[in-house]
Image (cartoon, rainbow, N blue to C red):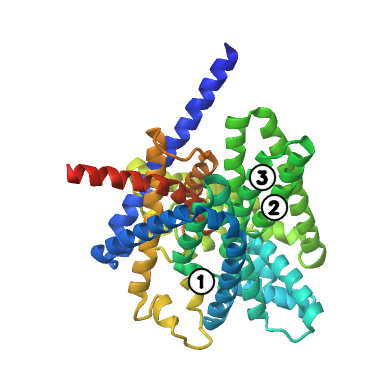
């Protein structure tokens, strides 16, 4: 009797996840379509691109099904050349859109160079005291630049070196999405994923934007891929090994951008609901130990060489600050909020003041105001389509290239570029919606367990509703969206055939 009840509760929870994801993706897609980049993106061209992308994906999937044996035999070879080609292309495009790293990226990038060449980060110490969340990326750059120095000598092009690392991150991301598609859905979807990734235009320029969003892009995807392999482990030792590798990947990702933790939580919930408490405790304990160890080691390197813990305790920006800032306007960066947070000399007084201000802001908003805020933040986060790469690319470009006429906010063809990017992005969201609807109706032809991916997207959205808002902050979970879209693609043709039959009737 107890087992039946437990099974019933888990089934209800899994059903609840689908409902939450459905409500979330419906809301996000609707608001993005209605807003259309403040109506600068015209409806008809947008619809044309959406239909074109859907048609392209269906054709590719049918082609891959028709030549199933060819792709089964040569998929690995094809994937190798695909990844090599995109890796090189990303470096070439990245070099063509060179800019001057400024603000946060400038501090991280130049801080790493200063650490190597001067042995300290004194000129950037204040920045890292205020924003210790970016120490992980600086540590990565320092280690990477040091290796490049050892191989090629002291005269290196730091920017190009960083572009190569950015291209590695994007390439690992591409590989992970494609291989997950193969494992979950089959070879035809792996081929379709390759084309879908080619249609995500901003990825060609992403290697040059080697900030936390892009540099953590591969971590959730690779973590989830390793999780799929852990499911196939036929012994306790192998499963533990997979969990350790998962934890190492996600720990490094979290050091770069902490929101990577959302995929860990999502997978943990799926493991608990599908595989039981023992597996959940095993996975959770291994991740907790490994992640804590990596964070401890990173902090030791930083605070034994560059900064002091005493000063960090005084200057570190508390998490409450971003929650407070996220409850004002549309949740974007607000200099006045930084002035407020830094006006306190007593830490306890500051934290109490921040709590009081958060409560006051939400009290003033009320329920209707909060919902309106969430609408504004949803549009800000997901209504762009370009992954907001031009936040960086327009920082004093080194020289003008043909791409600058399209990808910069102030460029003459930016509206056309954004229309193309947003069309692809809305297509992805539409397919995500289609996937969960067909699953709820019990008509999805694919049997893959999607709970973790749906939870992860909902988790990212929910986090951003309470945090500072930016069109970049969802980027490291783009893999979740792409995989959920491919799951939805499986039913698109079935719906189209039904429509076609009704027309001919």
Q: Residues within 10 Å of mark 2 (few under 14, many from 20)?
A: many
Q: Is residue 28 above or below residue 196?
A: above
Q: Secondary structure at mark 1?
A: helix
Q: Which badge, 3 or 1, comes first in the chain's sequence?
A: 1
Which residue is located at x 72 percent, y 84 percent? 156
Q: CA distance from mark 3 to mark 1?
A: 29 Å
Nearer to us: label 3 or label 2 = 3
Residue 1: x %, y % from top left: 57, 11
Residue 272 in percent (x, y) is at: 61, 32
The one of 408 and 167 positioned closer to us in this rendering = 167
Query: Which circle, 3 or 1, is nearer the viewer?
Result: 3
Rendered residue at 62%/31% (across/down): 275
Of pointers 2 and 1, the one earlier in the residue sequence? 1
Which residue lies at the image location 47% right of the left edge and 62% below the top edge?
Answer: 195
Mark before the other along the chain sequence, 3 or 2: 3
- Image position of 375 (left or right of 399): left
The residue drawn where x is 49% and y is 43% is: 454
Q: Which mark is residue 255?
A: none
- The span from disc 3 to disc 2 (Cα, nearest Å) is 18 Å
Label 3 SS: helix
Q: Which residue lies under the disc numbered 3?
A: 229
Q: Which residue is mark 1?
A: 204
Q: Is residue 435 visible?
A: yes
Count neighbours of disc 3 (C-alpha within 10 A) and say few if under 14, some if 14 to 19, many if 20 or more: some
């Amino acid at each position: 009797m107890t087992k039946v009840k437990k099974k019933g509760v888990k089934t209800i929870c899994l059903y609840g996840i689908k409902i939450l994801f459905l409500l979330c993706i419906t809301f996000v897609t609707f608001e993005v379509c209605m807003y259309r980049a403040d109506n600068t993106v015209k409806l008809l061209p947008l619809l044309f691109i959406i239909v074109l992308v859907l048609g392209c994906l269906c054709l590719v999937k049918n082609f891959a099904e028709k030549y199933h044996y060819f792709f089964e035999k040569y998929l690995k070879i094809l994937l190798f050349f695909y990844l090599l080609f995109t890796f090189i292309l990303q470096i070439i495009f990245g070099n063509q859109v060179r800019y001057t790293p400024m603000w946060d990226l400038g501090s991280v990038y130049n801080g790493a160079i200063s650490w190597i060449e001067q042995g300290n980060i004194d000129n950037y110490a204040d920045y890292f005291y205020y924003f210790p969340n970016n120490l992980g990326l600086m540590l990565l750059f320092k280690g990477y630049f040091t290796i490049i120095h050892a191989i090629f000598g002291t005269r290196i092009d730091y920017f190009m070196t960083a572009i190569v690392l950015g291209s590695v991150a994007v390439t690992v991301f591409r590989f992970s999405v494609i291989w997950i598609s193969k494992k979950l859905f089959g070879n035809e979807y792996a081929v379709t994923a390759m084309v879908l990734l080619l249609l995500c235009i901003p990825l060609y320029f992403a290697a040059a934007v080697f900030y936390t969003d892009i540099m953590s892009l591969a971590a959730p995807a690779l973590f989830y891929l390793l999780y799929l392999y852990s499911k196939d482990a036929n012994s306790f030792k192998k499963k533990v090994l997979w969990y350790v590798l998962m934890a190492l990947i996600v720990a490094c990702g979290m050091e770069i951008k902490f929101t990577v933790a959302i995929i860990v939580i999502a997978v943990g919930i799926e493991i608990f609901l599908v595989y039981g408490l023992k597996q959940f405790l095993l996975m959770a304990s291994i991740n907790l130990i490994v992640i804590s160890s990596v964070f401890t080691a990173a902090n030791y390197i930083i605070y034994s060489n560059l900064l002091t813990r005493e000063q960090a305790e005084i200057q570190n920006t508390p998490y409450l600050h971003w929650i407070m800032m996220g409850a004002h306007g549309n949740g974007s960066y607000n200099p006045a909020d930084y002035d407020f947070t830094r006006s306190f000399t007593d830490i306890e007084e500051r934290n109490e003041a921040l709590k009081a201000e958060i409560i006051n802001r939400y009290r003033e908003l009320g329920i209707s105001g909060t919902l309106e805020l969430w609408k504004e933040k949803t549009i800000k986060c997901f209504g762009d389509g370009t992954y907001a790469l031009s936040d960086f690319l327009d920082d004093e470009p080194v020289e003008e290239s043909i791409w600058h006429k399209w990808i910069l906010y102030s460029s003459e063809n930016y509206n056309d570029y954004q229309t193309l990017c947003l069309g692809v992005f809305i297509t992805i969201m539409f397919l995500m919606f289609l996937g969960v609807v067909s699953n709820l109706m019990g008509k999805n032809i694919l049997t893959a367990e999607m709970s973790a991916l749906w939870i992860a997207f909902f988790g990212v959205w929910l986090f951003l509703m309470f945090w500072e808002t930016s069109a970049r902050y969802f980027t490291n979970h783009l893999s979740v969206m792409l995989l959920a879209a491919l799951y939805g693609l499986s039913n698109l043709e079935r719906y189209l055939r039904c429509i076609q039959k009704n027309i001919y009737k």
